Image: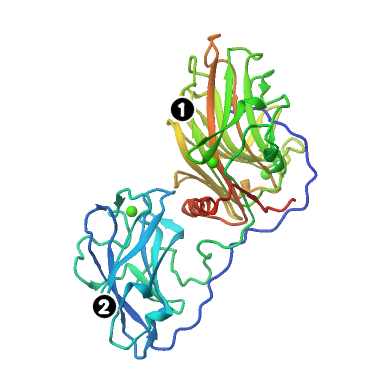
Amino acid sequence: MKRRSTRRRVALALAALLGSTVLAGVQVNSAAAAGSTVAVQYRTSASGSTADQSEPWLKVRNTGSSAIQLSQVKVRYYFKADSASATYKFACSWAVRGCAGITGTFGTLSHPTADADRYLEIGFTSGAGSLEPGTDTGDMQLRFYQSNWQILNQADDYSFNASQTSYADWAKVTAQLSGNTVWGTAPEGNDPGDPTGPTDPPGGGQTLFDDFDYTSSSDPSLSAHGWNVRSNSGGPGVPGATWDPSEVTFAGTSGNSVMNLRSSTAGTAQTTRQTEVLTKAMKFKSGTYAARVKFSDAPESGPDGDHLVQTFFTINDLKAPMADDYSEYDFEYLPNGGWGESGSILYTTSWETYNPDPWNAVNQHTEARQSYAGWHDLVFTIDDSNIKYYIDGRLFGTHDAQYLPERPMSINFNQWLIDLAGQSSATPRSYDEQIDYVLHVKDQVLTPAQVAAKVSAYRAAGTTFVDDVPAQ
Ligand SMILES: [Ca+2]
Ligand SMILES: [Ca+2]
Ligand SMILES: [Ca+2]
């Protein structure tokens, strides 16, 4: 792809590379007693393809030869979430043995499939007692619903069976006994008993989370939290343009603050204002990066058509032309074209290195020629085998190991103009890019659903900022 020349910053001294990607934790299994096993029967009590709530009713039967403690049993019902940010609540309507002994929790799958990225896990308290051979729990009338009570879609759920309206064995739910899977088949790659799989959700993981709850670009907390609002001149973008911190603003809506990057021009370099916010530290390498970003196709005021770039990216410094320890990973949205494109286009690009002059780029990119105006959940993950980009929970592109980073990077958001060729008017116009939050989890590959769950957990705890990612 055609590409800007460099955006340059001061080179920082950098420590040695840190090690390979580590997936957090493993599940610890204890062997089930020989001959112990269970079967699970399922029926639905809400058979519509959409519903106010999903109603998976279950019975667990002891098909082994000795009594089992119900507290050792976990049953998983797998489903596809209604959106990456959807959250769910569990309820037990009625159960032969009483609802008090039944628990319901939600988890996200480490390997999402077309019809499953979450699960409801049913467990039992110690008070639920034991199950003799040949007996079952009896009817457990369970249900779950979206926390916001919006209609949910069940037709795309792995464990849902609209036609099973009376109890029968059902292998598309799984049961674990003391950590071993003894019943059913999980969605591919998600066996709950797999000791090599990541814990779910992943534990630990040094994290940067910022909900961008600030008053202005000169709010002392913004700098104290490690952010630099750019004012120094230079590329990328229109030569002679100003990088203007006062055009970085914050506004709250219903308790949530978003950061606004406003860039503007009246058709000359002198009138062009660009905006950029970046971490002062280059300390981010492998792991998960996420941001909720609002792209815009049209100006807030004035004539449309400028060649804008609206971004979320990580980058370090090019120490020499074609130095292979350069690293950069980009989401770049061009609402009005540019770089030889005439319409809206989104690029994700993973860089090995480049030569500024003559221009020579060594990178891999994925593009989509369509509008991305509006809010989007942007995620990219870097492990020791590839780079994956996701938009709104869907895989957008996978880039190869040769483009993996060699050194830590900074995290950046900016909005700038490639040139002044898109709109020749002298009438002033301004464009907004908004950022709701940013998340980085060091050395852990999270699914988009796990990202959403982690952000929800911070918000539920009232946490608007945390950064325990160590300096490099
Ligand atoms: Ca669903
Ligand atoms: Ca926010
Ligand atoms: Ca490189």
Please rate how many residues cluster around mark 2, counting C-alpha atoms within 10 Å: few if below 14, some from 14 to 19, many from 20.
some
- 261 w.r.t. 284: above or below: above
Count every numbered label the image shows and give the total: 2
- Residue 339 visible somewhere in the drawing: no
Query: Farthest right residue?
Result: 13
Q: Position of residue 275 (x, y in %)?
A: 63, 27
The residue positioned 31% from the left and 54% from the top of the image is 156
- 69 w.r.t. 451: above or below: below
- Name the residue beneath numbered marker 1: 344
- 79 w.r.t. 94: above or below: above
The residue positioned 33% from the left and 72% from the top of the image is 99
Q: Nearer the viewer, residue 26 or 366?
A: 26
Please rate how many residues cluster around mark 1, counting C-alpha atoms within 10 Å: few if below 14, some from 14 to 19, many from 20.
some
Q: Position of residue 254 (x, y in %)?
A: 47, 39
Q: In this rendering, which labeled residue sits more in front, label 1 or label 2?
A: 2
Q: Give the side of residue 56 with respect to residue 22, left or right.
A: left
- Name the residue beneath numbered marker 2: 138
Q: Position of residue 257 (x, y in %)?
A: 54, 38
- 242 w.r.t. 159: above or below: above
Disc 2 CB within 8 Å of nearest ligand 1 atom: no
- The type of residue carrying mark 1 is Ser
Q: Report the Cα–Cα distance between label 1 and label 2.
A: 57 Å
Query: Farthest bottom residue?
Result: 66
- Quadrant of res 100: bottom left
Q: Quadrant of the N terminus?
A: top right
- Residue 148 visible somewhere in the drawing: yes
- Quadrant of res 55: bottom left
